[in-house]
Image: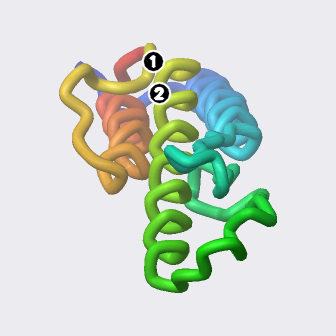
Amino acid sequence: MSSFGAEPGNAQVSRLEDLNRETRRIRTTMEGSTGTAESADGLVEATVGVYGELVDLVLDARIYRAPDAEVLASQIRTVINDAHSKAQDAVRTTLTDLFPKDLGGPEDFAFEPFLRMAGRAAEGGTR
């Protein structure tokens, strides 16, 4: 098995270019992925990006009919977390060929694919 550094110059540059293209494709897919979730009563809706950034939050005016800050805060947290999970699921589905079947939680999702790609590159393996 050849190591990444032992490849001839042109082959090494070609592999780096391939890795760079693949990384850009992944980044573009991830940056454009969002998830949307709604509370059970339909009064709170959130759209969240794959990295957890809040893209949009819609609060129905009916939330003021029975004002309860704690309940509203809980609903918002739940909806944002659900939307974040949906955004991550969308990326997993889109980039399924890069993810291991036993991928764990969000921390694995954020780093595992890139560690696997870097490991393959270092070992001289292919995608």
Q: Identify which residue, 20 or 64, lies in the foreground.
A: 64
Q: Amino acid at mark 1?
A: Thr
Which residue is drawn at the image coordinates 65% and 63% (left, top)?
53
Work out which quarter of the rendered image holds the C terminus and state it: top left
- Compared across the picture, whether 87 is left or right of 111 comes to right
Labelled pair 1, 2 in contact (Cβ < 8 Å): yes
Which residue is drawn at the image coordinates 45% and 18% (left, top)?
96
Question: Mark 2: few, some, or many residues within 10 Å (few <14, many ≥20)?
Answer: some
- In this view of the protein, can residue 13 be seen by the observer? no
Q: Quadrant of residue 76?
A: bottom right
**Label 2, on which residue?**
92
Colour mode of the rendering: rainbow
Where's residue 4, x and y in %? 40, 34
Work out which quarter of the rendered image holds the N terminus and state it: top left
Where's residue 108, x and y in %? 30, 48
**Label 1, on which residue?**
96
Q: Identify which residue, 104 or 13, lies in the foreground.
A: 104
Where's residue 14, x and y in %? 66, 24
Where's residue 124, x and y in %? 37, 25
The vertical placement of 98 against 69, above or below, is above
Q: CA distance from mark 1 to mark 2?
A: 5 Å
Q: Amino acid at mark 2?
A: Arg
Task: Identify the secondary structure beneath mark 2.
Answer: helix
Q: Identify which residue, 45 or 14, lies in the foreground.
A: 45
The vertical placement of 96 against 103, above or below, is above
Question: Mark 1: few, some, or many residues within 10 Å (few <14, many ≥20)?
Answer: few
Q: Quadrant of residue 11?
A: top right
Which residue is drawn at the image coordinates 76% and 39% (left, top)?
32
